[in-house]
Amino acid sequence: MFLGEYKHNLDTKGRIAIPAKFRGQLDGGAILTRGLDHCLFLFPKNEWDELVKKLVALPLAQADSRAFVRLMLSGASDVAFDGQGRVLIPDHLRAYARVSKAAVVTGLYNRIEIWDEAQWQSYKTKTESASDEIAEKLGQLGI
């Protein structure tokens, strides 16, 4: 499982170091794609395969389903680690997430998210200030 929050900088080639404690869980391969809230999702290959099964089962006739599948799949990229534990973030994904230099890598159980540092701070501040309301809504769902 992936847990924690780490600050890293992209190098001039658009590579980012993935925390060493995460790399072992990505030995079987990894997929990088557009995430939600303008971040990037990095999935271990096995988790990605499970997600793709669910995505392709969505109803093709529904516009929202098609749009979400396109968002997740069309920009997806296999990533490989270099000798220093870095992955290259393709240009189109860097542009989507607005990541240019300072970034945050967060572990979210079955995936990793990569955020522009300023966007992450803004998102985190907003979410933390609404935590009571969010908890209440989740409580209604039995969580």
Image (cartoon, helix red, strand yellow):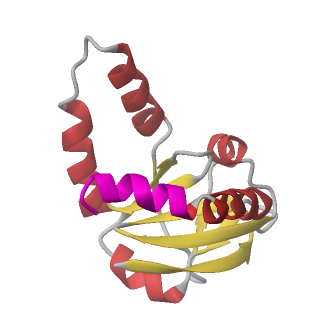
Residue 15: x percent and y percent?
68, 65
Residue 31: x percent and y percent?
41, 56
Above or below, comparing residue 4 to residue 40 in the picture: below
Q: Which residues are magenta?
A: 132-143
Tell whether 39 sits left or right of 109: right
Q: Quadrant of residue 6?
A: bottom right
Look at 23% across and 32% down and name the residue there: 56
Residue 55: x percent and y percent?
26, 36
Look at 60% across and 83% down and name the residue there: 84
For the stretch drawn in magenta, what is the main secondary structure? Answer: helix
Q: Is residue 135 magenta?
A: yes
- If the image is split into quadrants, where does the N terminus sit? bottom left
Look at 46% across and 44% down and name the residue there: 76
Q: Is residue 25 magenta?
A: no
Hey, which residue is sitting farthest bottom in the picture?
Answer: 21
Relative to the observer, which residue lies in front, 135 or 37? 135
Above or below, comparing residue 143 to residue 67 in the picture: below
Q: How many marks?
A: 0
Look at 72% across and 67% down and name the residue there: 103
Hey, which residue is sitting farthest top in the picture?
Answer: 61
